[in-house]
Amino acid sequence: MSVSSVTLSIENTAVKNKALQPWLVCLSAAMFFFYEFIQMGMFNSLSPELMRDFKVSATQLGNLSATYFYADVVFLFFAGMLLDRFSPRKIILSALLLCIGSTIMFGLSPNITVLGISHFLAGIGNAFCFLSCIKLASNWFPPRRMALVIGLTVTMAMAGGVVAQTPLTYLAQALGWRHAVLVDATLGMAIFVLIWFFVHDKAEDAAAVKSNPKTGNVMQTVRFAVSNPQNWLGGLYTSLVNLPIFLLGDLWGIMYLTQVHHLSRTSASYITSMVFIGTIIGSPLVGWISDTIGRRRAPMIVGALISLVVMLMIIYLPNLSFNTLLVLFFALGFFTSSQIASYPLIAESNPKNITGTATGLASILIMGGGAVFQPLFGWLMDLHWNGTVVNGVHMYSTADYLSGMSIMPIAFVIGLIASLLIKETHCLPYQGKE
């Protein structure tokens, strides 16, 4: 073999490695998002045990689960500003360590106060998680690929949501909920090792952060992000369309299906998993469609409209069978994955050097949905509860659940209005004056 052939072979290998590195970096970082969705969704599988062991009502359980989202709302904007100024790799590793520690604390909690504090700490980790993934994606990929990359990132997160349903239900039944949570913490340690080896900052972006004086101007960055209506509308849309994940996938879905449709916990967990599976399939597909047609608004409008129809069918159609519920919950997850288009839309609506801050502002609205609506759902159920308790678990009527479920159709209508008000970016990077 000639020297020129060897040189060409080495160059081709280098090009392939360079092409693969962005995917390796971003998908490895997305494993943290996968892990965080297990923490976010574990209450759905563990709620009967938590109600029994800590003697809490639906309102109290909703408030306890919402501590995760309270932490997000408090720390997201702060996280966005940090990501515009410091290494995403260091931030994501530090946040994951905090999340692992909080998971261990959750599994060992002696009372509801420690349980709430540990879940709050996990929420702090989540505040840095998705923003880190978006920041890395915007650094490593061009705008025309952003929706697909973010769609795949969310797909991995939804896989974590699936793990938090049937697999965690089985694990809790086999080992007890505390040991199941400690197994979850061990998984987090393995993911930490993966991220340590494969996630790296892009050299030129790290250098740009240090050299760009605007990055250091906190007030200017915040002022720009807050004054941009695209950030508010995109965040509002995603928060409202994402409610099936927060309400049915993360907390109330299994109890709703067991108490209203009289399914076993295992069967109910299969159905709630379909919300995540629908999103797993829908997220990259919506991302690909959005990138291909060069539009962000159209998928968002269609997704909100069809999600509204599906939600009304779930609430009001009588005598739904197991298979029908599987299809409807899958469709709900699939069409609400239109939220994927809002993330690149926000990135494209802001200068690159404030992507983290802008996304952090939008994410406050997004996670605020969980902080507000999980306790509200529980409060609406407790409002007319007749006081029935079986084996330490509060039992609610169909009417009680419908009071809580009514939140979602209203949210989809408001989300649809927000999507109509958003300005189309045509998948192009920010063109305004920085």
Image: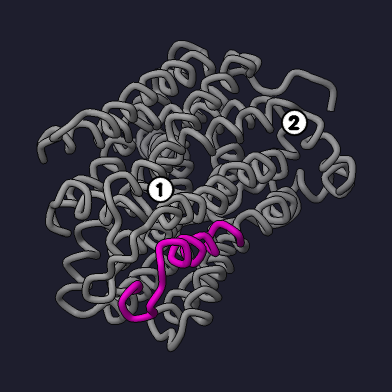
Determine which quarter of the picture holds residue 326.
top left
Up/down of 221 relative to 308, above or below:
below
Q: Determine whether the residue tagged by mark 1 lies in a helix, strand or loop.
A: helix
Colour mode?
one colour
Q: Quadrant of the C terminus?
A: top right
List x then y, in percent, for residue 313.
27, 27
Q: Is residue 185 left or right of residue 265?
A: right
Q: Is residue 7 visible?
A: no
Q: Residues within 10 Å of mark 2 (few under 14, many from 20)?
A: some
Main SS of residues in magenta: helix
- Could you tell me how far apart the alpha carbons at marks 2 and 1 are, in whole angstroms? 34 Å
Given the image, on which type of amino acid does mark 2 rest? Pro
Q: Which residues are magenta?
A: 50-71
Quadrant including the N terminus: top left
Q: Position of residue 11 (x, y in %)?
A: 44, 37
Crowd class of label 1 (few under 14; some 14 to 19; many from 20; radius 10 Å): many
- Number of the label disc, if any, that sits on residue 351: 2
The residue mark sitting in front, 2 or 1, is 1
Disc 2 secondary structure class: loop
Residue at screen point 39% across, 24% down: 308
With respect to residue 432, does 276 lie above or below? below
Is 217 situated left or right of 102 in this image? right
Residue 250 visible somewhere in the drawing:
yes
Check the image and report above or below for 103 versus 380.
below
Residue 69 is situated, as x and y percent measured from the top left of the image, at 55, 57
Residue displayed at 64% across by 54% down: 73
Marking on residue 247: 1
